[in-house]
Amino acid sequence: MAAGSLLAVCSMHVSCSKEHVNQSTDQLLNVSKTKAVAITASVQSLSDYELIWSDEFNTLGGFDNSKWSYAERGTVAWNKYMTHTPDYVSQDGNNLVLRMDNAVIPTDPVPYHSGGVKSQSKFSMTFGKVEVRAKFTQGRGSWPAIWMMPEPATAYAGWPGCGEIDIMEHVNNEMVVHQSVHNATVTGSGGGTSATHSTSYNAADYNIYGLEWSPNALKFFVNNTLQYTYTKATGATWQQWPFDVPFYLILNQAGGAGWPGAITNADLPFNMQVDYVRVYNLPIFYNGGFETGTLSPWTSWGGNAAIVSSNMRTGLKCIQLTGGANAVEQYLTGLQPNTTYRFSGYGKVAAAGQQVLLGVKGYGGAAVDAAFNTTSYSNNSVTFTTGATQTTATLYFYKAGNGTVYGDDFTLEKL
């Protein structure tokens, strides 16, 4: 856990002997329809995020042990009071409730008890989007957190070299939350990190704490607003970027040691209520409508490719190719082998006699394309089937001759 803590990992993290269990289809959650927030992304439109794992915490009693287990008690600051009973981890019909208090338990004579869960050996991920909607009480000595650790933990080294992703931490009565990264490069000898950012939050209500984790960056969000980005350095080694192995989730209410300092008993109990946890795949295909106003992740060759604010089919932007032969391309990763996809979009030419092609290459078969040659937008598409081991392809919008052409509203679907 984040800045200022004393070795904010438990002994299980340092010993780092964990078995990675892949998420299978039968582990996916049947999402309750009682939630007010829409959660589904189309499984056909691969430009959208696809929900792959979640817990809505809509039942009463204990947590779903197919997804979570208790966070173990350990000897470091965040876990020294973890307690394995429903008094400290439970569902109230709408939330997972994580509690900390100073109740006397004769069989467990520690001054405080607190609750936490982890998805270790139940679910882990490499790259994707995580959203957790939660609220928590403030208090002197309180330390709620939403964070991630690697599985297996010694893929690169013991902590902090193994890496840690802190989606949200809060201490005491601060009016900010902290979002941080730990690794061998940014974490100091006292456990603090230079890769951290604090931002305001709504202390009286739920907030959505988010992470978008790509092969090149960790982007941290609060209420869908980007707050902090930690970027993979050019030529990075594992010391700066250990974030290419599976990580699992931890939700906990801690306190009374390390970063937040001593507890003021008058402020107890501390509670964190978690409305939901949702994990999504990264989109395979991006920026099909060019509404970001930038070309990325499309690349261009031949010159004279531009995002313009005229001649759109929908929205405020489209792609324009002018001059001689040139194209824009998007290289895809994460496709499934032996799977059929359809790449479609809209195109038009500025004058009769011109032409532009929409197509796919590098998917394990011969290039396929379809032509646009009308001066008003028309729709066209190509289908392609990846090879037995092929997980990549390149989409293109290509003009072979002179003239000006436009493209908009490209989509990719799995058939």
Image (tube, rainbow, N blue to C red):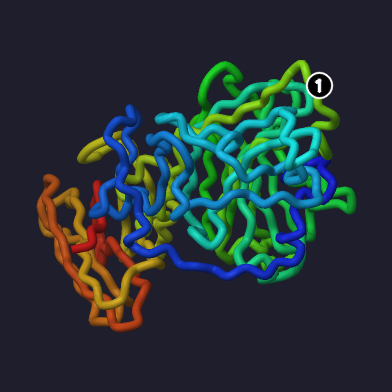
Closest to the observer, 271 or 333: 271
Q: Is residue 165 above or below residue 339?
A: above
Which image quarter holds the N terminus?
top right
Q: Position of residue 412 (x, y in %)?
A: 26, 57
Q: Percent x, y for residue 207?
A: 52, 27
Of 136 and 225, nearer the camera is 136
Q: Under tag 1, what secondary structure?
A: loop
- As rendered, which of 17 and 236 lies closer to the eye? 17
Residue drawn at point x = 77 percent, y = 16 percent:
266
Percent coordinates x, y for residue 320 in the rendering: 31, 49
Residue at image mark 1:
264
**Residue at image location 59% in from the left, 34% down from the top:** 87
Where residue 271 appears, x then y in whole percent? 62, 27
Quarter residue 18 falls in: bottom right
Specify the farthest residue to the front.
Answer: 106
Report whether residue 226 is seen: no
Residue 34 quadrant: top left
Q: Is residue 306 left or right of residue 254?
A: left
Considering every residue shown, the one lying at the far right of the view is 189
Tell me if 304 is positioned left or right of 150 in this view: left
